[in-house]
Image (cartoon, rainbow, N blue to C red):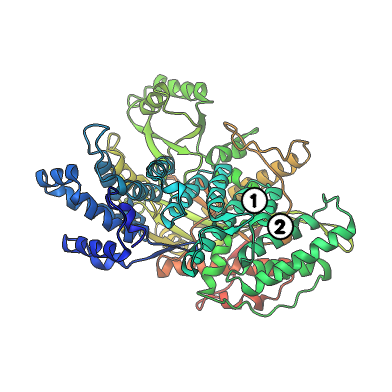
Amino acid sequence: GTVALRLLPTDANPAPAHNAMDNLDLCTQLGARRHLISRTTRQDGISCHVLSLLAYAIIMAALCHRPFLATALAMPSAASMARRAIELSNKANVDPSFAQEACILWTSILESCCNDSELPLPLGAMPAAHALHASTLARVGRDKEAINEYQKSLAFLKDSGALSKSLTKEEVDIRIGMGKSFQRMLRYREAADTFLGVAARCVDINDGIISGKNTETLGWVELAHSDSIQRAALCYMRIGDLDAAVTILEKFGGQDAELAGMLGSLLHIQMSSPSSTMKDTEKREILQKAQELLQDASNKSTSPIYNWIYLTSQADRSGNISADPFRCKKGDAYLSFAKANNSPFDDPDLINLDDKVSMHSVVMEPDRDGKDFWPRGYILPQELDSFLAECNRDENIGDEERGTRKKWILKERSGYGSHGISIASTDEVLKMYDSSKLTEPILCQRIVDPPMLIDGRKFSLRIYVIYFPGGKLLSEDGEKRIDAEIFVSTEGLVKYASAPYDDDAANSNADFLDDQYMTNSGRGDGRSSQQNDLKQLQREFEMNGINYKTMWESIEKSIQMVMKRYIYLQHESSLMEDALADSRDSSSGYSFIHNTYAPICSIPKIMGFDYILDSDTNPYLLEVNRFPGLEPRSSLDSDVKKTVVYDAWVAASDRMGVPKEYVQDLCPSNYKGSSLKKLPL
């Protein structure tokens, strides 16, 4: 109720909270759905009421606002548009397929005024309206636009004087949302700064929590503080800046189990590193502190990560591990281990595979050994001349449709879930360049054509790869080398486009092309997405006399080539004096940190390699997903993912000498044996 008051006209003193709730009840009489008011979503431990409690105050305020009311009277659908946008925004938190329609509606509402001096909604409603718009934009991968909307929301709060007062949940949600968008765009330093801004609003270093006048307020402020610090430290770990992460955790950490676990892990990593120059006595003191923090986090955290790190850190000294089965303290054991794949303790250099532009450079330069499985492409605008040369060759061979035919796929470097990807003709690509729309490097690749179809539809393959980095560790016997390991799982998914493929649809609209070309369940109408497993694909091949084994061997070969190339470049960079230089903002190419801390933890990294087959069943790698979605969406989906996650952690147990009984609760009920095959490096 207190937060909802912010959305009411601000020309009067705030009414008591119960009056705000009375006004919300009035909204329900005007047609809002009361049951949605009580809905609460939970994002990473922070209870967010903005999308439900605040939203209906927008309806009430909007209907009482003269310009909007006049519009509503002249056009009966105006009020229903607002209600519909809010309803879709709430649904988009669960099902992203609703977000696109919500984006369109919010754009119509927020840009409905004829002049800049007139607001489409009351001033007090504008922060939440822009925040809702931003959240839906983020759900469809339009993070750059979402950041702009979040900034508008904060600007309205600043103009109202709210940012000079005590912190509110509304402000926390806006800033955390903006930080997440920076994070998804791989702009980790800006993300860290945004999260630290939340922490600065939560905590005064000298006086403690500044907003806590009562237990209820103190609780959510502490939760927001812990979440923002954890996110900021994670961002610095993603770019390999462990010192900055340690500084943040030591300065802000407090007694939170997750923060204590992160700090303990990082201290253990730093002290165990061969590059550490600290005296032995100092090392022992810090290692003792690290062990105490890890043990505390192991006992209190709901995640298996810190329990695992604590166990494996013991193995560094004794070589033997005795471990009871891991018991999940809260929730499902599978989901706990699946979430561990998003742990900050993975190899930070994997950004070079996650980033589409860097991935192209890793695979194709300098000897271009990836041409057999990586579609031909160009980094624009840097390789514009080469792109134009190919376009001219098309013209010379008499390709009459070279300009208008959709033959290119444009990939933003930080695209995910099929977002940040578009289909374009040659003329459209050149027009983008001529109009200076290509302000940031993009990867422009040839569409694999003609594609293999099943029941008239395009499809892609999600192949799961488990990666353990290599590196050097210190043990009682001196320096110890742990080799990198790569496994591929025979369990995987076949994802179908939602619409039949039409080779003649060269001039179709973007949405129709998306339905034909995009196979990720997070893109387009997710409600109509279809998928199968690799076993079904193998049966399909056998029914049509196609050699599945040959296709699979080509996939294994391409995975092996990508990872060998990656590990080689990582090793070469470690020999350079500037290996630790952070050049993530370079216009193109790869940049390796070569941080050797990942093997200490030996947490399995599950990656998703996505492929498409041409009409001759030759596989082409589309992208590598550093954080593939492992949450089950169906029974078939669940069987595949649970087997992959279990097999990955069994491999980790074998690697570190942990008894397999440790992960016995992970074993699927219908488990049929290991799906992993180790690939030589």
Q: Position of residue 624 (x, y in %)?
A: 54, 48
Relative to residue 148, is residue 548 drawn left or right?
right
Mark 2 sits on what residue? 266
Q: Position of residue 326 (x, y in %)?
A: 62, 76
CB contact under 8 Å: marks 2 and 1: yes
Q: Residue furthest front?
A: 13
Q: Which comes sooner in the sequence, label 2 or label 1?
A: 1
SS at circle 2: helix
- Residue sitting nearer the eye, 573 or 489: 573
SS at circle 1: helix
Mark 1 sits on what residue? 237
Relative to residue 641, is residue 255 drawn left or right?
right
Query: Distance between the Cα atoms at labels 2 and 1?
Result: 9 Å
Q: Within the image, what quadrant is residue 352 found in?
A: top right
Q: Position of residue 464 (x, y in %)?
A: 54, 58
Relative to residue 269, is residue 211 drawn left or right?
left
Q: Position of residue 319 (x, y in %)?
A: 81, 70
- Residue sitting nearer the eye, 72 or 165: 165
| Image point (34%, 47%), residue name | 133
Residue 434 lies, with reference to residue 585, above or below; the image says: above
**Which amino acid type is marked by label 2?**
Leu
- Residue sitting nearer the eye, 487 or 170: 170
Crowd tier of the residue under label 1, counting other residues whose Cα lies within 10 Å: few below 14, some 14–19, many 20 or above: many
Q: Residue furthest bottom?
A: 324
| Image point (49%, 31%), residue name | 440
Residue 405 lies, with reference to residue 308, above or below; the image says: above
Quarter placement of the N terminus:
bottom left
Q: Within the image, what quadrant is residue 368 found in?
A: top right
